[in-house]
Image (cartoon, grey):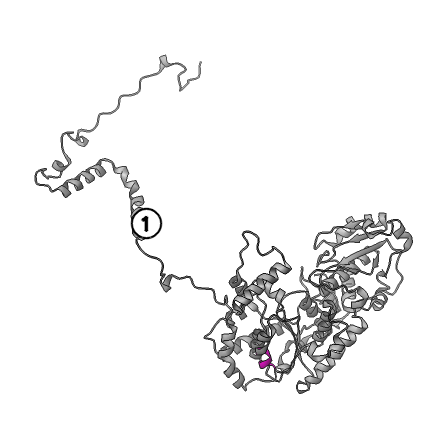
Amino acid sequence: MHAKIRLPTSGHNTPSPPASPLRSPRLRHPRSAKPSARFGLGVSNRSFAQRIAWIVLSILLRRQGIFLFAPLLYISGMLFYMGTVSFDVVPDAIKPRRAPGSVYRSPELYAKLRHEMDADNSTTDAMSTIWKHAKGGDWRPCINKFSGGLPESNGYIYVEANGGLNQQRTSICNAVAVAGYLNATLVIPNFHFHSIWRDPSKFSEIYDEEFFVKTLENDVRVVDTVPGYLMERFDRNLTNVFNFRIKAWSPIQFYKDTVLPRLLEERFIRISPFANRLSFDAPPDVQRLRCLANYEALRFSSPLLTMGETLVSRMKERSANNGGKYISVHLRFEEDMVAFSCCVYDGGAKEREDMIAARERGWKGKFTKPGRVLRPGANRVNGKCPLTPLEVGLMLRGMGFDRSTSIFLASGRIYDSERHMDPLLEMFPLLQTKEMLASAEELAPFKNYSSRMAAIDYTVCLHSEVFVTTQGGNFPHFLLGHRRYLFNGHSKTIRPDKRKLAVYFDNPKIGWKTFKRHMLSMRAHSDSKGIELKRPNDSIYSFPCPNCMCRPNKTEDSRTASTL
């Protein structure tokens, strides 16, 4: 029995298609009937316009598919009509509104609030009442140090610390941790000369090298030079030593799996560059070595430490009316910082020319690449613009600090300093800088060295009652952790919300009482965040609790927290 095939294989067996059904007589119209006749109109009594209209209507009725083109006809008509309208003048109602906080209008706000601000006598003693949460801080330094001898070394590690003062500090502490973990001998890190900081200082000119080696002697071997017999293997040329190019934020396990075998084979390796080459999260033993290096072993060299402590004493003398307490402000409003931020202030054409020149000088071609668009308004709204001296002054006055408050300003050379610094000095006449506190002769040994000058600023800021950070970076991040280490876990640091500040500074209708209420709320928030525990992916150099500090009588809690 053969299967039935629906499609025939030859034309001879093709069946005839069924006959088409007849059209219904009711749907058929006589071909001779005219459209006008069907609608009861005669041809003789129609005008020319009526004839044209009926012809068009007749076509539409016969060809209904033409209605598909009706939207296109409508749009074409609208475009034709709009082409006759002038849009040179756009009504205000349809102009796009700029985002609040996208324009620098702080000078206008200062002019508006200045009278009320100076007349405000309701301010309490802000210096004595600011840190309410600090009284509850009972964290104490508790870094364990080994007392026994070290096993035989697996080899020597040489690192290059690049960047500025505190980026180099990161490299040093991470190098100590890696060397200790691999049971290696650390060669005193070499400071890489950077084209921006331009400081040729060596390790011993910034830090107390002897104290550094002595503090680590039972935990990590540290030497100044590599033995001659080992250098002979490499023709006394460091470039012949194998150099590891390690990815940023590599886990400590990578060093054990990849670096250690080569170290055992070569007995001497280099790691360059080394900034940020170790993950924030690491086993407790690695974190302990980081704590030991940063908070105990690294101490500034004697000339820097002496200069810094001298300026601390002078600041306390000038703050006698506040019990020797003063505020330190880290202000980043140097020309290169303003240029890099791509923000616009109130300097007009001169400022624009200065910033273009500074960007080209420091980052040649980076900001002029095809397709690169600078968005100063968006940067300001997102809190990425450096605060001006005027804005810092307004913020601190709003937080309750009056004209009798002593302020130490840690900064480089302020851009257009005379114009920008005048308002701040009007609000805080007791403001000081290291150049104002020390004579030119005293600062001469450090003057042309950016890292040494930064070390002096670091020391004065470290011992202030209040530290104010106005921009991100390694300097405030290290101070945040170091102050926590000194002040029972509380950073005593004001970290303003710059997104909110941008909106407040851009509001010409805001009154002094409302502005002050916002600033006091921001101050209270900084106080509440003074004591914070390290979370995953946080830096131990900013959050020393609980890895570097513990709470007395709560050892079990601290041990549990250290596993986080």
Q: Position of residue 525 (x, y in %)?
A: 59, 72
Quadrant in which residue 468 is drawn: bottom right
Q: Residue furthest left?
A: 44
In the rendered structure, the answer to whether residue 63 lies left or right of residue 263 reads left
Quadrant in which residue 528 is drawn: bottom right
Q: Is residue 427 magenta?
A: yes
Query: Which kind of residue does numbered mark 1 sit on?
Result: Leu
Q: Quadrant of the N terminus?
A: top left
Q: Residue at x 66, y 87 (%)?
A: 321
Q: Position of residue 397 (x, y in %)?
A: 57, 79
Quadrant in which residue 134 is drawn: bottom right
Rendered position, 385 above or below 63:
below
Magenta segment, prevailing SS (helix, strand or loop): helix
Q: Position of residue 429 (x, y in %)?
A: 61, 82
Query: Badge 1: few (under 14), some or many (20 or more) residues near its Cα, within 10 Å?
Result: few
Q: Residue at x 30, y 50 (%)?
A: 78
Whether residue 488 is visible = no
Q: Quadrant of the C terminus?
A: bottom right
Q: Which residues are magenta?
A: 423-428
Q: Residue furthest right?
A: 229
- Helix, strand or loop under label 1: helix
Q: Who is closer to the viewer here, 549 or 246? A: 246
Rendered position, 152 above or below 338:
above
In the rendered structure, the answer to whether residue 207 lies left or right of residue 126 reads right
Q: Which residue is mark 1?
A: 79
Q: Residue at x 54, y 63 (%)?
A: 379
